[in-house]
Amino acid sequence: MNKISIIGAGMTGSTTAHWLAERELADIVLMDVVEGMPQGKSLDLLEAMPIIGKDVEIVGTNDYAATKDSDIVIITAGVARKPGMSRDDLLTINAGIVGTAATETLKYSPDAIFVVLTNPLDTMAYLTLKKTGLPRERVVGQAGILDSARMRAFVAMETGVSVENIDCYVLGGHGDEMVPLTRHSNIAGIPLKEYLPADKLEAIVNRTRKGGGEIVNLLKTGSAFYAPSAACAQMAEAILKNKNLIVPCAAHMEGEYGLNDMFFGVPVMLGNNGVERIIEYKLDDEEKAMFDKSAAAVKETHEALKKLVTL
Ligand code: TXD
């Protein structure tokens, strides 16, 4: 059995464990700093296994040693921004948490592939790469699968077509400047622009961009967790099963799309080695402008990190 360790047993971490256990994909370790919580959640989830008929070991822990020999480490540990906390404050706190999570897990699992979820996503993935010193194949961030799934869900709601027929690609940074590529998105091969009137498509694009905020406003406390964790599970499955699945993920840019030394949401082929390939779309001028704007925003956060933390 493969082994996946999830650092941070909060909403996204524990729900990732849930999706993974349902797929019987790997034994799971849930690690958190809060005493008892990861142990309690793991035991509860483990007790569900006889009901759903899955043979999966699930262990909760406060000790990194339990993550030993993981094939995949998923980092969801961190805090959300609270009233009065600046973006830089959040960056400093989460950089400390993610940096420790990355270096400690690497000690016990030198061959692991890292999937990062903690926000600010692109920058936390960058930090993980720099702190671990791993090749770029082995660090990948989750954002694009979620943003694209939101767009797919909204298209399905608008058209009544099965979600399975709907392919959408949302690239760029995980923020307001994300880049929903309508030209590359389609319903059963029919370009979205042909299937939907312009005003409906525009409304879907806008709702996608604000998708995270919509959930935060409804929940009042906390942020989305079902869809983000489902995305992490899909990434883990693609890696462990060597699927060569092409999905939008945050990857380290080394010249692709004219970008260098930064994480950015692009189509990534996920397989046994992690990032097997980065796919470069041919962008038109309008798309290129959106990419550049989004890249500038991500770069700014990367620069802020470099001022706050030694990499
Ligand atoms: O698409 C995406 N990338 C995102 C990102 C979608 C959803 C959530 N996104 C971000 O993930 C979110 O903005 C946060 O930065 C993380 C985790 O979100 P979650 O909703 O799971 O937050 P919780 O429920 O507060 O859980 C965080 C857990 C909590 O249990 C803490 O005790 C734990 O992290 N934590 C730690 N675990 C281990 N080690 C340390 N140092 C630590 N510090 C906090």
Image (cartoon, rainbow, N blue to C red):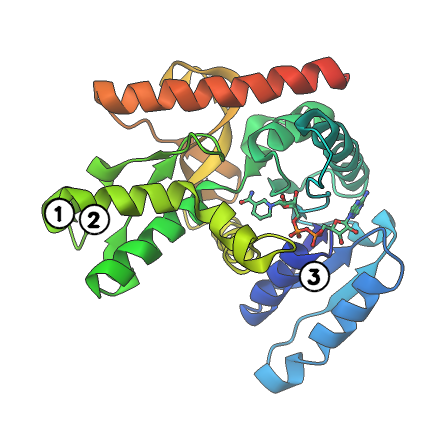
Report if the CB atoms under discs 2 and 3 are less than 8 Å apart: no
Residue visible at 68% across and 20% down in the picture? 305
Can you say whether 116 is above or below 288 in the image?
below
Number of dots carrying numbers: 3
Q: Amino acid at mark 1?
A: Pro
Q: Which residue is mark 3?
A: 28
Image quadrant containing the N terminus: bottom right
Residue 6 % position (x, y): 70, 52
Q: Name which quarter of the figure residue 300 lies in.
A: top right
Residue 72 % position (x, y): 64, 48
The earlier-in-sequence mark between 2 and 3 is 3
Q: Nearer the viewer, residue 259 or 55?
A: 259
Q: Residues within 10 Å of mark 1 (few under 14, many from 20)?
A: few
In the picture provided, is 298 more to the left or to the right than 17? Answer: left
Q: Which residue is mark 1?
A: 197
Task: Tell me the distance, in whole angstroms, between the alpha carbons under discs 1 and 3.
Answer: 45 Å
- Within 8 Å: ligand 1 and the Cβ of disc 2? no
